Image (cartoon, coloured by chain):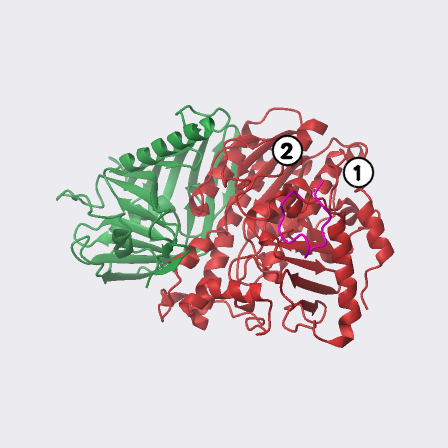
Amino acid sequence: MAQRKAGRTVVAEPLTPTLLARLGALDSLPETPPDFDPARSWVNKYLIFTCHGYVESGNQGIGVLRLEREPEERGAGFLFRVRQRIVHDTGHVHEIEVLARCHADRLATPIEWRLLSRIEDPGGRELRGLQSEDRGSFDAGKIVVKRGSAERVRPWKGPLTSDWGLMEAVQRLDPGADNSGLFSLLQGFAVMRSGQEIVAVRQERVGEVVGGPLLRVTQIGRGVLPYDYWLLPGPRRLAILTTGARAYILDERADEAVNRRLRAIRARNRRRRHD
Amino acid sequence: MIEVSRRRFLKAVGSLPATGACGLTGRATPNILLIITDQQHIDTISALGCRYSRTPAMDELARRGASFHNSYCADPVCSPSRSAIFTGRMPSETDVARNGRPIYRGIPNLGQWFREKSRYETYYAGKWHLPRTYMAEIPGFDVLPGGIGGQGNVGDSCVSRACEDFLWERSSSRPFLLVASFLQPHDICEWLRLNLRDPGALPYPELAPQLPELPPNFDYEPFEPRHLQRLRQSNEPARGQWSAEHWRYYMWSYYRHVEMVDGEVGRILQALEDTGRLSDTLVVFTSDHGEGLARHQMVRKSSSYEEAVKVPFLISWPGELPENRQEPEKLVSGVDIVPTLCDFAGIPPPPNQRGWSLRNALTGKGEHPREMLVVEIPADVGRVVRTPGYKYVTYAGDTLDQFFDMQRDPGETHNLAALSGVAAVIEDHRRLLREWEQMLRPAPNQPHADAWWRRPPG
C-alpha cells in the first residue's frame, strides 16, 4: 500500500527481506560454504543499507560491516574481529576495528576487547586528533575500559553482550530452546543498552528472493528499535538484519557499493567547489 | 487580565542583555558544550517526569543544573530554529523561514562571533542544516566531521565519538565552544514513512504491555486554523487511518529514538568527566523543535501546538550554578542561547539580539526580563505569542485565531478566541505581536509582510 507524497512513493511498511528486494537492495544472497558452521571459523560481510522511507530515492548502501569468528585454540571462547566502514554525507569515512575475545555462550559474552576508531577525509587521509583506542574487559562483576592512562571501572551484574556479538550469537541459538531472559548490550562497545530480550524465534516465508523461509529472531529492548535477525535455516547463517530504517545484508560485494557512494560524494564535492 | 506590563515589555525589548565585563566569579571563563538534539518533545526526560523513556544522561544533566519547563524554539522546523539558536535573531530576520537556507549575509553566527570577540576555540560536530544538513566547512567553526541525513541511528555515534576524541586529545589551554548536534530522535520521520500503513495488529505483540497510553489531548477541537488541519491531514496517521494501537506503537518507538540519542549524549558527558573538565564546562542542552507525539493527533513538527514548539532546555555548570533546579514558569526561547553563552563567556552579544541572557534566572541575581515570546511558524505563515498565562496563535490569511489559557488548559483543548470575555486580553496579545514585529529587521523578500505589520527591510 505505497502512497505518493510530493511525487515520491512512501514505502509504508517496515523493512523486511521482501521490501529490501522490492527496493532493489537484495537480489540474491551469496553462496554459503557447505561446511559453514556458526560455532567454527567464518567470515560474514554485510552491506549496511539505509532507507529514507521512499521507494524512488534515499535508499543506499552507506557502509560495510565485516565479522570474522575464529575459535580459540585453547579455552572455550573465540576471537571476534569486527571491521566497520561508514561513509558519511561529507565523504568522510569512519572506520572502527575491534578485536575481541568472547565466550562461546548464549550471548557471546565479551571477555576483553580492543577498539580502534579513526576518521578519514574524503581524500582518504586520516584526520589527526580524531583517532582513539579503547581497551575493555568484563570480568568479576565489572566492566573496565581504558583509554591511554585513564581507566574507568563500572560495576556490572547480569548477562552482557554487544550488538556485533549478538550477530554472532544468534547463529548459534537453538530455536527449540528457551531463549528468553533479559540481557544488556554494549552497543559499539561504548553505549550500554539495558532491558534487551529475545522475544520470538519463528520461521517466516519472505518471498522468492532467498529461495525459501528464513528463521526470524526478534530482539526488543531499551534504546533500540526492534531488531529482526533473518537467518538461513539450514546453515544458520545470519543473512539479513533489519532494525528501523537500517538493514545489514550479507553481501560479498559490499565494498563496491560503498566505494560507489564515496566516488559520488567526491564528484559532488568537486562540483560544489567549482560552482 | 493579562499579566504582561506594556511598560516593562517595551523596556525589556529595548535593552541589550546584561553581560559580564569579564569572567564570572573570578574564575576563568568556562568551556562551553552546547548539545542539540533534533525533534525532541519536551516531555521525554525521565528525571523530569517522563514515564515512558529512560534517559540517564539527560537525567544527569537535569540533576547537575537547571531545567526550564517553559522553553520554546523560535520556529518549529529545523533550519529556521537553528538559525535562531546560532544567531539570536528570528528566522524572518535570518532569511531562514524554510529548511535548507543559509543565514542571511552580515548576521554572525555563534562561532564567528566567539572567534571575533573572545579567545574561545570553536568546534562543531553533527547536523548544521544552514543550508545543508551536514557540511565539511561551517563559517566560524572547525568541523569534527560525521553524520548521515535521515540516519541518526548510524551517524550520531560518529558525532559522539568525534566529540569524545576531541575532548581526550585536546591540549590547548584556551577555552572551547563545542557544539554537539545530534540528529536523533528525528529518525522518527523515517519510522513514520516505514510504518504509514497500520498493519491491523501490533507488529511485535510482545510490546503490548509496554505501549504508552494515548495523551489526554489526543482529541482535538474541529475548529482549527486551516494550516493545522492541512498539516494533520498530510501526515501519516490520517493517510494510514491509524488505530489507537498503532498510535501507541508510534509513541513507543519515539521514546526508543530518544533513548538512542541519550546514549550518545552520555558518551560526551562521560568524556567530560574522564578528562577532568566537568567543573570547568558550562553545558547547555536543547532541541531545535518538538514532536507531535500524538497530542492533537499530530506527528512531527511545524504546528503551533505546544508539542511542536516546546523543547527541553537544560543548563549546568557544576559548582557555579545551582543544581537540580526546576524552572516551571520562566519563559525561555531559542534566541536566548546566544546572549546567554556570550554572557558566560564574558563578551557582549552580537547586535540586535531578540533574546536575553539567562544568567540572572540561573543565579537568582536580578530579574529575568522576558515576559513574552514569539514563535514563528515555518514559511512565515503564522505566529505564536506566549505570555506567562496565555497563548495566542494567528495564521496569515486565516480569520480563525486560537487563544488558550495555559494555566487551566495546558493541553490546548479549549480555544477561547471566540469568547467575548477575553477579547481585551487577545487584543493585548495582538498589540504585543505588532510591537514585536515592528522591532524586527526582516531579511528582504519575506512573505506575509502585511500580515505581520512589518517595516520595510533595511
Q: Residue at x 61, y 60 (%)?
A: B304
Q: Mark 2 or mark 1: name the one nearer the start of the chain.
A: 1
- The amino acid type, in three-letter code, at marker 2 is Gly
Q: Residues within 10 Å of mark 1 (few under 14, many from 20)?
A: many
Whether residue A173 appears in this view of the structure is no
Which x, y percent locates residue A138? 42, 42
Residue B19's tag is: 1
A160 or B125: nearer the viewer: B125
Mark 1 is on which residue type? Thr
- Could you tell me which chain the residue with mark 1 belongs to? B
Image hue for chain B = red
Q: Is residue B332 left or right of residue A27?
A: right
Q: Which x, y percent locates residue A100?
A: 35, 37
Q: What's the mark number on residue A33?
A: none
Q: Report how far apart the C-alphas of labels 2 and 1 lie in the structure.
A: 18 Å
Left or right: B452 as drawn, with respect to A169: right
Q: Horizontal placement of B315 versus A40: left or right?
A: right
Give the secondary structure at mark 1. Answer: loop
The front one of A184 and B224 is: B224
Can residue A193 be seen here? The reply is yes
- Residue A126: which quarter of the image? top left
Label 2: which residue?
A: B111
The green-coloured chain is labelled A
Front-most of residues B87 and B215: B87
Secondary structure type for disc 2: helix
